[in-house]
Amino acid sequence: MSETAIIKIGDKSYELPIVEGSEGEKAIDITKLRAQTGYITLDSGYLNTGACTSAITFLDGEKGILRYRGIPIEQLAENSTFTEVAYLLIYGKLPNDAELVDWNNQLTRHTMVHEDLKRLFTGFPKDGHPMAILSCLVASLSTYYQDSYDPENPEHRQISMIRLIAKYPTLAAFAYKKSIGQPTIHPMNSLDYCSNFLNMMFAVPAEEYKIDPEISKALNLLLILHADHEQNCSTSTVRLVGSSLANIYAAISSGICALWGPRHGGANQEVLEMLISIQQSGLSVKQIVEKAKDKNSSFRLSGFGHRVYKNFDPRAKIIKKACDNVLTRLGIQDPLLDIAKELEEVALKDQYFVDRKLYPNVDFYSGIIYRALGIPTNMFTVMFGMGRLPGWIAQWKEMIESPDMKIGRPRQIYTGPTETSYADAKKKA
């Protein structure tokens, strides 16, 4: 007999089925709760609510585990490429050699964007945030592919997914070039995914741009680490918008907007700005840590702790090592990195942080690497989005193809005025 939970309301008891995942996670299925009892659950921020079952990413915050389709993130970071990881997330398995070649060729063939789309850039102010521009451009892609954006058509899904992964770097680089007043650089089919993006970002028509393989390798790693992270704010947004059967471009554009927030994708930018402010303050790292612990101070350390991880973020361990390697390889002596290292060392020995399990997260070091690669601060979240794109697409695809898919429609508990006549409302006004 399958396990059940019993909920008692008044003198009545109700049995609710228990759902168990492949890693032993358990959930109480409340699908029929309202129909049976007239009650709903209330869970602000959805901290205890599972909106779906998913076979894409497993995350154990207590043990510091992250796996894509069962494969540990440490192994993928060591052995894989970003486009291979994208294939893994979307199609559920690692591609063989022939499949990977075909996948990369398809991505390469779709990197160009329609010339008319480039005219949109002229309408944006020079200092417009790249995330605002990017969300607009991604949504506008749907106007160019109106014959192939039906979410329920498998062929339409396939070509749309390829177009999005292929064109995102082109649009992102174009947005950056617009912000600094340089001409756009077209994609080059001879380059791999990461190298092609770096060329579009930093090449100029006046001279040849030489791509450092170490920089391309570092970017590849960062994108892999950000590729998916279960049901986070932006992924849930993509699923919610996609559940209405809006086209994939609209759904991904909504995810970009959700990622833009400083509590989500903007966190690595906050970390870098914090390190700069510490450098400019003249205070020692120990003084900064004490300030962060002071309840009467508004100062908070960015990059420590995580909504899900109550152990060390496994991505942070990988990225810390990569950060050291990249800066050493490029010969960069970044005082912000020295501050970050000292900050981590002091905080992890402080009982306040130890008791609260406030470990450095992936955002703590990623901003420093992006800075070393020459990526400007306002592009950090754009880079996060590039990495997260395959995860968004995989989650969208999984939802669309599920026989149990329903349009997302959360309930609420109303706390406003009871019925009031129009005349009485006018009097009160």
Image (cartoon, rainbow, N blue to C red):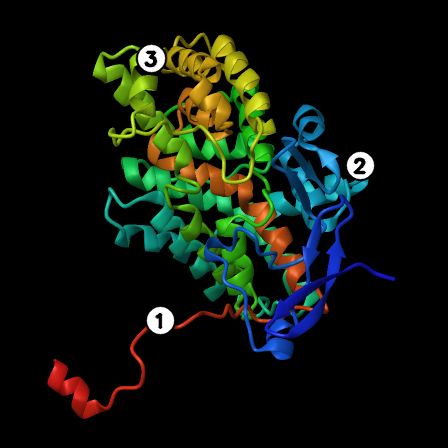
Which image quadrant for residue 282?
A: top left
Which image quadrant for residue 126?
A: top left
Image coordinates for residue 114, horizontal then vertical, percent: 46, 55
Give the alpha-carbon distance from disc 2 to disc 1, as whole Å.
58 Å
Q: Where 38 falls versus 45 (above or below)?
A: below
Q: Residues within 10 Å of mark 3 (few under 14, many from 20)?
A: some
Type of residue at label 1? Thr
Mark 3 = which residue?
Answer: 285
Label located before the other in sequence (1 or 3) = 3
Taking depth in this image into account, of 63 and 362 the one nearest to the observer is: 63
Residue 110: assigned label: none
Type of residue at label 2? Asp
Question: Of circles 2 and 3, which is in front?
Answer: 3
Q: Where 121 falls versus 206 (above or below)?
A: below
Can residue 390 be seen? yes
Q: Which structural element holds mark 2?
A: helix
| Quadrant (top left/top right/bottom left/bottom right) for the C terminus | bottom left
Mark 1 = which residue?
Answer: 415
Taking depth in this image into account, of 368 and 428 the one nearest to the observer is: 428
Q: Which structural element holds mark 1?
A: loop
Give the alpha-carbon distance from disc 2 to disc 3, as whole Å.
49 Å
Looking at the image, residue 25 sits to the left or right of residue 122; the answer is right
Q: Where 339 falls versus 220 (above or below)?
A: above
Tally of numbered discs: 3
Question: Of circles 1 and 3, which is in front?
Answer: 1
Q: What residue sits 53% from the left and 28% below the top?
A: 219
Which image quadrant for residue 96?
A: top right
Label located before the other in sequence (2 or 1) = 2
Label located before the other in sequence (2 or 3) = 2
Image coordinates for residue 313, horizontal then vertical, percent: 57, 29
Q: What residue sits 74% from the left and 35% below the top?
A: 71
Residue 97: assigned label: 2
